[in-house]
Amino acid sequence: MPVVPRSRSRVVAAVGLAATLALGVVACSSDDSSDSSSDAPTTDPAPVVDEAELATAIAAYRTYVIDQVEEMQTDAKVLTDAVRAGNLAAAQAAYAPSRQTWERIEPVAGLVEELDGKLDARVDDFEGEDDPEFTGWHRIEYILFDQKTTEGAAQFADQLDDDLQTLADAITEVDFDADVVAVGPSELIAEVSEGKITGEEDRYSGTDLWDFAANVEGAKEVTKVLRPMLQKADPELLGDIEDGFDELEAELAPYADGNGWKAYATLTESDKEQMQASLGELAELLAEVPGALGLG
C-alpha cells in the first residue's frame, strides 16, 4: 500500500472536511429555504499573529542575514586572496566554503538589485564561459576547476570582493517584509529540489552538496524564528515541517566530510531520488507557512 506524504494527507483531510461542511449547508438549505446566506453577518478574520511578536522575529532574522553577509565577505576573501596569489590548490579548497553564507540567505540577498546575476549566475544565462558579463563565483569556479588554473581569474576575484561590499552596504537598507521572509524557506528548498539536486549548480567543481546543505540550513533558520508563531497558528504544520527537516538531515548525513561535504558524484541515484522526494514534500509544507500566519 503506497505511503501518502504528510502534505497530501493534510490536503486530503481538508478536502474531506470541506465536503462534509458543504453537505451540511445543502441539507440546511433544503430544510429552510427562507434562510439566505446574504443575511449572515460578515466579519473580518482575526489576525493570526501578534504584530509585536512578528516584528521581533523579523528583527532576529535581519540580524542573522547581516551577520551572514559579514561572514560571507570574510570567507570569500580567503578565496579571492588565493586566486590573486596564484595558489590553485588553496583557491579550489576555498571555493565551496565561500558560498555557504550566500546560499543560506539567497532569497533575501537576491533582493539587492542586479547583484544576484553578478554574484551567482550560471553560464546558461550568457553567451558562454568567455562572455565578459559572466562573473561571480561560477566564473571563478570555471577557471579554477575546468581550466585548472588561476590565470585570468584575478579580475573576477576583485569584482567578487567589490560586489560583496556592495551587498554588505545595501543589505541594511533592504525592506524585510514579513511575507518575503515567510516565503523564503519554500523558495530555498524548491530550488534545491528542482535544480541543485541535479548537480547543475556547481557543475565544474562538483561541490553542489555544500550549497544544498546551506540552503537547508537557511530555510531551517527562518522556520526557527517563526516557530513561536507557527506553534500557535498551526502546530500540526510546524510538526510536519520539523519532521521534514529531520528527514533531510538524516539523508544528507552519510555525505558529510569533516566540516564539509563529499563530491556530488558520490551521491547515489537512489539517494538522489529519495532526497528529491523529501525536498519536494518539504517545499510544499513550507509554502503553507505564509497562509498559516496570515501573511499571504
Image (tube, helix red, strand yellow):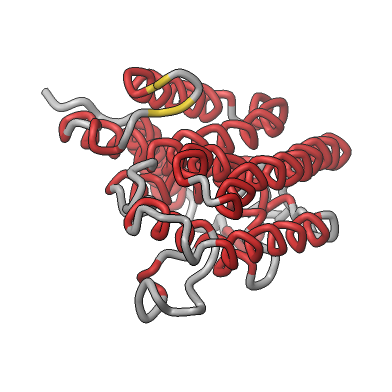
Q: Going by the picture, which residue comes out furthest to the right?
A: 52
Hey, which quadrant is residue 257 in on the image? top left
- Camera-side residue: 191 or 180? 191
Asked if 77 appears above or below 265 in the picture, the reply is below
| Quadrant in which the N terminus appears | top left
Residue placed at 40% from the left, 76% from the top? Answer: 130
Is residue 181 left or right of 213 when viewed as pictured? right
Q: Residue 79 vs residue 32: left or right?
A: right
Whether residue 210 is situated above or below residue 141 in the rendered picture: above
List x then y, in percent, for residue 290.
61, 47
Task: Place residue 289 in its image quadrant.
Answer: top right
In front: 5, or 91?
A: 91
Side (left or right) of 49 relative to 128: right
Closest to the observer: 38 or 239?
A: 239
Q: Residue at x 52, y 30 (%)?
A: 237
Image-based side of 109 in relation to 4, left or right = right
What x and y, as percent, mark residue 78? 63, 42
Q: Is residue 216 visible?
A: yes
> Residue 102, how many percent across, how many down?
60, 47
